[in-house]
Amino acid sequence: MDRTGSPAGTSSGFSLECDPRTSEKRALDNEKARRSQGVNGTPAPMDTNYREEIEPPKPKIRINTEKIGELLRVEDRGLKKFSPEQLFEAAASGDIMMLEGLHEYLHDSHGKLSDSLYASNGKNVLMKALLNLHDGKNKVVEYLLEISSRMGDVEVFVNAAYKDVYYEGHTSLHIAIERRSMEYVTLLVSKGADVHARAFGKFFQQQKGPSFYFGELPLSLAACTNQPAVVDYLMENEHHPADVRLPDSRGNTALHALVLVADNSPENSRFVTAMYDHILAATAHLHPKWRLEVVGNQQGLTPIQLAAKTGKIDLFRHILHREFQSGPTKHLSRKFTEWVYGPVSSSLYDLAYLDSCQEESVLETLVYGSDIPNRHEMLTIEPLSQLLDEKWDRFARYIFAFYFLSYLVYLFIFTLLAYNKKGGEPPYRIKNTREDYLFLSGQVITGLSSLYFLIRGIFDMWRKRPRLHTLLIDGYFELLFLLQAVCFLLSAWLYLSGRQEYLGFLVGCLAMSWVNLLYYFRGNKHLGIYSVMIQKMILGDIMRFLFVYLVFLVGFSAGEQVQINGCVRLAHSGRCYLHLLTCHDPTGIFKAALCLGRSRDT
């Protein structure tokens, strides 16, 4: 049997509650509870009225004769009775005198503060008290914990969590950390608070609208709100130390959470970088064998890879240049200075997760991450800049030169093939001559090359996955090569189908092939700037001019077509003279004359 009289795990249709207060007294108590919340009656964050529910509770009726007897005994002894509203009012106001006699009442009525009767949607009076601290204190907190300890349910009472979908999983320990109260954090942990409780409600996830993602765990919350003392206590306390390697539902550790809350502002960057190093150093001190920075999330991204993917350039630069001077943490450095002579220095960098020889490397992420707004600035940070220069000097420029020469051969063959095309109806018969075999070989080479351009363009677009607003910038030449390949393949299909329209697509493909030669000019520092300049001109002023020109072209063309169609209809009906009389401009008179001439011919 539960404390209301129903067997455990069962429920019935209605709920019957006895309240000794009159309706006027009940209304007055409710008004006091509303006024006591927050400042000037405004609820504190994550604070609501006691009876406010997301879903209306189903009516239930439970009758317990033993409970009725207990209440009668309490009434006979003259003890003070406490309703849930009174407890929440006392917790919000911080008035400990309002709770005098609470322990005797709970003891005689066989009740506990952890009972669902004293909670609303998972939120109990302890959370209410922590949400309403006055100058960082609320004596009701200690009083409630002392009573709960006497009743033997303090661990359940402390670890109660919100059931609201918006704040689900949020516990008293989260609230104490959010209120920046070190005193209550230590008190709750000493009473058995779960340091690995996860707040996974919608408010604590990355979404549009009001939200704050901090990694769900209390340790991550303390780190993301810049509380190093709380972080140290959670990791080092003697009751239940927090495991810094424990991830949230997305696989993110406290370091991942710090990366996600960074916003590249100076103040934010200072505290995030300091907290990042603080957690690394504390972990190395407590657990020397743990390698926290190499732990990946569900996407397989380590903190430095996540910083590169999300464009957190200040934290990313700090991680690349991190250097510890002391012995116990020196192995955590990613930069090692060998010698310094005035303004000149020699340093070694740790290239783990940076070089493109690894999957999801930082270098590959920045090169193909078209949605990263500051990726070009990040590529100029050492050692990435020098790494790119070394790759270009050692092998990349030779590969690029090979592609350039291969494209010149393709372009030369394609131009000769188009210039010396045969006349007559396609497809042309191949005779047993050297010229025809050369013509057939050129067709095969250009066809295979166009198929290669198509496959490579699709593969590059898939790797970059550019969004709509970055498609023309990061996928400019990929789109041109795709268009070139599609034009040739359409021309080949029409040619084999015996259609003369193949010639138009062939001409368009040839023109596009010569335009795409500008892509290979980027390999030269003197000509590459002109390629970039032409791209910006086409995507800038020329694109806007063509759009405006297209609007005028369509509008005037439609108007002229309507006018011409009207003249033709009048001419066929033998009434072109009416149109001639109604036309007041020279162009209309000229068109009417043409209509009359057509009518005479017909």
Image (cartoon, rainbow, N blue to C red):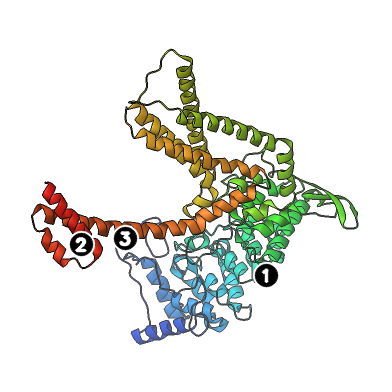
198 shown above or below 389: below
Disc number placed over residue 12 in the picture, else none: 3
* Location of residue 67 in the rendering, given as x and y in whole percent from the top left corner: 40, 68
Mark 1 element type: helix
Outermost residue, left direction?
574
Q: Quadrant of the N terminus?
A: bottom left
Separation of marks 3 and 1 at Cα, in angstroms: 44 Å
The answer to which image quadrant residue 318 occupies is bottom right
Separation of marks 2 and 3 at Cα, in angstroms: 91 Å
Residue appearing at x 43%, y 37% in the figure:
507
Residue appearing at x 43%, y 27% in the figure:
421
Disc number placed over residue 589 in the picture, else none: 2
> In the picture provided, is 499 more to the left or to the right than 269?
left
Judged by depth in the image, the label closer to the viewer, 2 or 3, is 2
Outermost residue, top direction?
432
Badge 1 or badge 2: first in the primary sequence:
1
Query: Is residue 243 at least partly visible in the picture?
Result: no
* Location of residue 568 in the rendering, given as x and y in whole percent from the top left corner: 16, 53
- Give the residue number, with chain letter if any, for mark 1: 182
Amino acid found under the numbered disc labelled 3: Ser
User: Which one is nearer the viewer's eye here, 76 or 354?
Assistant: 354
Amino acid found under the numbered disc labelled 1: Met
User: Which one is nearer the viewer's eye here, 544 or 354?
Assistant: 544
Badge 2 or badge 3: first in the primary sequence:
3
